[in-house]
Amino acid sequence: MFEEFFDGRRVLVTGVAGVKGAWLALELLEAGAIVIGVDSASPEPDSNYTAASLGGRIQYVQGDITDLAKIEELAGKVDCVFHLAAVALVGEAQANPLAAYRNNTWGTAVVLEAVRRSPSVRYAVFVTTDKVYRPNNGDPWREGDPLGASGPYAVSKSSSESIIADYYSTYLQPAGKRLGIGRGGNVLIGGDLHSSRRIPGSGRIFVDCYDALIEGRSPEIFQPAYTRPYTYGLDIISGYMNLMSRLDCDGVDGEAFNFGPHERYGVSNGLLATKICELWGGDTHWTRGAARDEPFVNQSLNWDKSRERLLWEPAFTLYEGLRETTRWYQEWARWRKDAREGGLKELNASLIRDHREAAARLGIRWALGASNAAPSGSGLPLS
């Protein structure tokens, strides 16, 4: 995978206890990397980090992302850095703006400084979001579109991109260090704990759906007509890893890349909830709840640049990604009754294997590892 780029490499993942951080760590281990993870909080006992038994498979360090001494120490031990640590919810950032600016902006500057000072780090990927773009009436965002939407989450993330660009041109590029920015769509993956039950007013729609279905309730959808570029999480993570593995290629270093779904014009929240209920089984249907404030009505994401320069594309349609995500949450519902470390380790490995095999069948380069592999262009519509 990834032309064996990660085999034997030492990799630092910030935000490793989060949903994407844990899956990224699992994928890196599968690719042969030695992983060090840092997070500001101890992993939740019912998190995927615990369910996958990551604690015994990586070196975990609890530390604040704004602690330069700590991050510099860790960066001095690795070759590569993936920076994911952030306040990750729009509603959470809205309720705690100073925390969003501290973690998403100052935290990014600290990681950049640690990369600058590290004698060993050569490659770094900084994960931001597609929410950095200004509203575009639902037309697909492209990497060259203006940044700077409103609200603490979007502003903190777009501000961090300005800091990244300045550090890159002033310090990192002259030192021969390679850097890329990954902007992902809305992530669908097992292990996301950001539900409205845990974080009132800020839960992710698909997590709320699974929470309700596990409890035998009808999912409540606040803005069913709003559309989002929902993307299977392992597709986005393959994008981050593919980006890093190709940072030495022309037209990649110092650039930002979108990673999104085959369904580029976004899918409505109502359709998403309908598909989740169908896959779950039974006779449960979602209901409409009181409208909740959201920063965008319609969102879409164009990833032509990733196809052309990285030879990347998603391996799963939305339906296929939801099928795998539903499989994870159904097993998690059973596991939670007798939670034990490593209880979902085999399931996670199976999901990673399924995704890798699907990408290989489609001829997607990162899964083949062949230097002459070409993008397949074989995306399928939502079924």
Image (tube, rainbow, N blue to C red):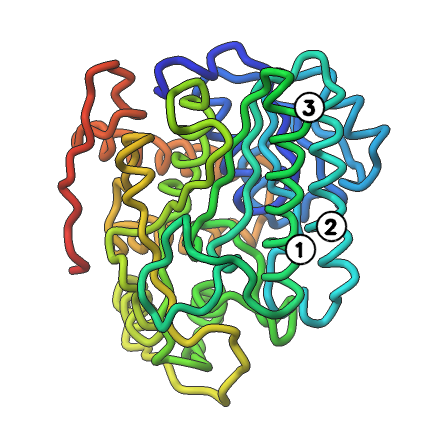
Q: Quadrant of residue 17?
A: top right
In the displayed structure image, the side of residue 65 where residue 351 appears, left or right: left
**Which residue is rendered at x = 71% and y = 24% of the image?**
116
Q: Earlier in the sequence, mark 1 or mark 2?
A: 1
Q: Are marks 1 and 2 in contact (CB under 8 Å)?
A: yes
Could you tell me how far apart the alpha carbons at marks 3 and 2 are, in whole angstroms? 22 Å
In the displayed structure image, the side of residue 46 where residue 98 appears, left or right: right
Name the residue tied to disc 1.
Answer: 87
Q: Earlier in the sequence, mark 3 or mark 1?
A: 3
Could you tell me how far apart the alpha carbons at marks 3 and 1 are, in whole angstroms? 23 Å
- For the question of whether residue 57 can be seen, the reply is no
Q: Earlier in the sequence, mark 3 or mark 2?
A: 3
**Which residue is rendered at x = 67% and y = 29% of the image?**
170
Depth order, front residue of 382/57? 382
Which of discs 3 and 1 lies nearer the camera? The answer is: 1
* Residue 82, position as x, y percentages in the image: 58, 32
Q: Quadrant of the C terminus?
A: bottom left
Q: Are marks 3 and 2 in contact (CB under 8 Å)?
A: no
* Residue 286, position as x, y percentages in the image: 36, 80
Mark 3 residue crowding within 10 angstroms, few (<14) / some (14–19) / many (20+): few
Name the residue tied to disc 2.
Answer: 103
- For the question of whether residue 109 can be seen, the reply is yes
**Which residue of the protein is positioned furthest toward the bottom in this rendering?**
290
Q: Quadrant of residue 173?
A: top right
Which of discs 3 and 2 lies nearer the camera? The answer is: 2
In the displayed structure image, the side of residue 87 where residue 145 appears, left or right: left
Q: Amino acid at mark 3?
A: Gln
Q: Is residue 379 above or below residue 369?
A: below
* Residue 58, position as x, y percentages in the image: 63, 24
Q: Which mark is residue 227?
A: none
Q: Amino acid at mark 2?
A: Asn
